[in-house]
Amino acid sequence: MDTEIFENLRLELRRGSLILAVLAQLRTEHYGYALRKALEGHGLAIDENTLYPLLRRLETQGLLVSHWREEDKRNKRFYRLSPQGEIVLYQLLNEHEAMNAAIDRIMAPGLSTSSVPAPDAAVDGETLSQPKEQLQ
Amino acid sequence: MTRPSTDLIDRYLQAIGFWLPSSSKRDILAEISEDLRSQLEDRESKLGRALTESEVADMLKQRGRPVFVAGQFLPQRGLIGPALFPIYVLVLKIAALCYVVPWLVVWLGMLLFHRVGPGSIGTLWTVVFTQFGIITLVFAMIDRVSVQSPYLSDWDPRKLPKVKIEATTKRRCGAIGGIVFGIFGLLWVLAVPQFPFLIIGPAAFLVKAAPVWQSVYWAIIVLAIASIFEQVVILLRPQLTWFPPTFKLATILLTAWIVNVLRHTQIYVLPASPQGVDVASAVNLALTIAIAVLPVGLVIALAINAWQAFREIRKSMQHATPHLA
């Protein structure tokens, strides 16, 4: 039961962060697979079944633009941030920073993640400092 | 020869495509296809060899059941998750087709013959909402249970159905048949004035064509040539899916003109001998009824083709999407 609660909260917490990461990564143009690899390289592996629907949704919302182009003898769909996406990314980053700062203040003094008794609260073989690789 | 990995990926894509809406199917499949092939290349270059069929099957299995993958691209609903949503939509469509549509047809029939009043349509809505409610409830319950079930993970990509003949190949085969029959049709139309028995059989000795046919004969030949032209274009450019319905709109309009000319007379055949008087009046009556009903069919055909043409033109403008391979 605890695992299920943690899993649901984890998904909820990461859903927004994932959008932020995708928008930030797409300040430079990427096609789907290259984007996945780039995010993975930064320690944020993302499931392809989550990434592609997300990209389509962000494009429908006008935050991304895309076009098909041939590269390495294959047609690939390249995505990048739209001007509207740049504004939204800037606003989201500000919000994210404010949120982080607030949480840091709440946790202080002396209550950082390292001081939380994580080992006992290990969930599904992981600790808070070792998040699952595959994100939803 | 097709590589086992390519064949398996194509089968997987076909299975995903079954659950996707036709408006976005091509685009989504092209993108998933590209991602799968990139992943395949990536792993092969790391291993320094081609992946075996079983390794590709594992890769696809890890990605998820086709219905689940397709479900992620559909509008998300709170009650029914992505794994079941495409199946839920399919069942709703089947229920509408097998239950609601026949009900509507029967109701319209009863209304036309004054067995029920227009107010009784309320019963239809009750039927529709009950059906919709029961199906939704059942799927919501299955969704709760299936989250824990091995349904999503326990499947074998190697058991997916073989890839069907490509739509363009199918269209080309159909076009070849269409051209052959079109040429026979044209020769037949050209031969009819010389050999009237080709159209009315032994009755040709009793009746002959009325003058009204002379005024529309050129249009009938144009229609026969247009049909061959349409098939030739399909054969040479099967990817132009907007062309057949758009071209049919023009031919339907020409057919409508012919029908309109014919409607202004009720004499389509004349007796060729005194014995043919009764036959001529019977044929004229039959053709008068047929020509009176034809406009209904033409309006339906016009509406269907206009909708298809609009859909295909919009699709071709929206997606400058490449082929899947």
Image (cartoon, rainbow, N blue to C red):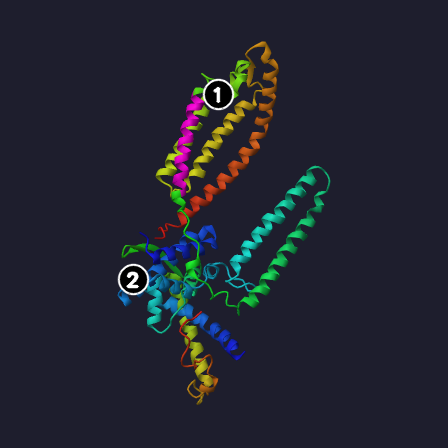
Instruction: Name the magenta segment's main secondary structure.
Output: helix
Viewer can see residue A59:
no
Instruction: Give left or right: position of A87 versus B113.
Output: left
Which badge, 2 or 1, comes first in the chain's sequence? Answer: 2
Tag 2 residue:
B50
**Chain letter, disc 1 residue:** B
Q: Looking at numbered disc 2 in the image, what kind of residue is underneath it?
A: Ala
Residue found at x 52% / y 36% = B301
User: Where B263 falls versus B173 (above or below)?
Assistant: above
Tag 1 residue:
B198
Judging depth in this view, the residue of B60 and B54 nearest the camera is B54
Which quadrant of the view contains residue B277?
top right
Viewer can see residue B180:
yes
Judging depth in this view, the residue of B195 and B284 nearest the camera is B195
**Chain letter, disc 2 residue:** B
Judging depth in this view, the residue of B226 and A84 nearest the camera is B226
Residue B80 point in image, percent of width and height = 55, 63
Label 1 environment density (alpha carbons within 10 Å; few <14, some 14–19, many ≥20): some
Q: Looking at numbered disc 1 in the image, what kind of residue is underneath it?
A: Leu
Q: Secondary structure at mark 1?
A: helix
Residue B257 point in image, percent of width and height = 50, 27
